[in-house]
Amino acid sequence: MKPANFVLLHPADLSASAAFYQRLFGLAAVEHSPTFAMFVLPGGFRLGLWKADCVSPKTSGQTGASEIVFTCDGDAEVEAVHADWRAKGVSILQTPETMDFGHTFTAEDPDGHRLRVYHVAANPA
């Protein structure tokens, strides 16, 4: 088995979600159909969007109980990403703050999927 490099979300409105992530990442989907979209981020991480009412087997549709985490190279980058996402109208759930594991903020996509951005602390507690 290879290391995980792919997360699949189940948005209710695929078009709205794909537009959100295209604006957020500044990248076009590498694959797009009426039921699926795929984004490939620098470094090879892939984010797939599969329209919720087409998922098989069916899903509960509950969101917000997990997070996709994006790592930054420093606290200043966390602050810059936060400013960029706010300017793009992204819903911010937690403004930047330093926690025991590092400097972080949390946002959400249109379906309530949580997106955490952080820089790891030098000596996490």
Image (cartoon, rainbow, N blue to C red):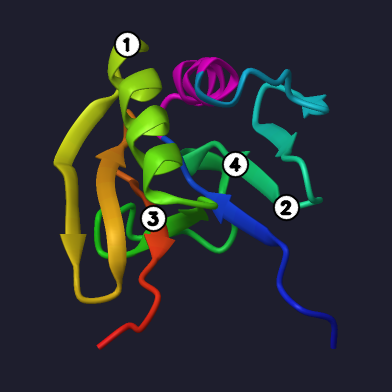
Which image quarter: residue 120? Answer: bottom left
- Res. 63 in view: no
Query: In the rendered structure, which disc, 3 or 4, sits on the residue that comes first in sequence?
Result: 4
* Crowding at mark 4 (Cα within 10 Å: few <14, some 14-19, many 20+): many
Residue displayed at 40% across by 75% down: 122
**Pointers 3 and 4 in contact (CB under 8 A)?**
no
Mark 3: which secondary structure?
strand
**Residue at which label 3 appears:** 118
Specify the label residue 87 is tagged with.
1
Tag 1 and tag 2, C-beta contact below 8 Å: no
Image quarter hosting the N terminus: bottom right
User: Gap in Å between the C-alphas at discs 3 and 2?
Assistant: 17 Å
Q: From this viewpoint, is residue 47 visible?
A: yes
Q: Nearer the viewer, mark 4 or mark 2?
A: 2
| Measured Cα–Cα span from mark 1 to mark 3 | 18 Å
Q: Which mark is residue 50?
A: 4
Q: Secondary structure at mark 4?
A: strand
Task: Tell me the CA gap for discs 4 and 2.
Answer: 16 Å
Q: CA distance from mark 3 to mark 4?
A: 26 Å
Whether residues under marks 3 and 2 lie with C-beta atoms below 8 angstroms apart, the answer is: no
Q: Secondary structure at mark 1?
A: helix
- Kind of residue at badge 4: Trp
Viewer-side residue, 26 vs 53: 26
Residue 45 got which mark?
2
User: Earlier along the polypeptide chain: callout 1 or callout 2?
Assistant: 2
Of the numbered discs 4 and 2, the one sitting upstream in the chain is 2
Q: Is residue 3 left or right of residue 51?
A: right
Up-down relation of residue 55 to residue 78 (above or below): below
**Label 3 neighbour load within 10 Å: few <14, some 14-19, many 20+:** many
What range is drawn magenta here?
A: 12-23
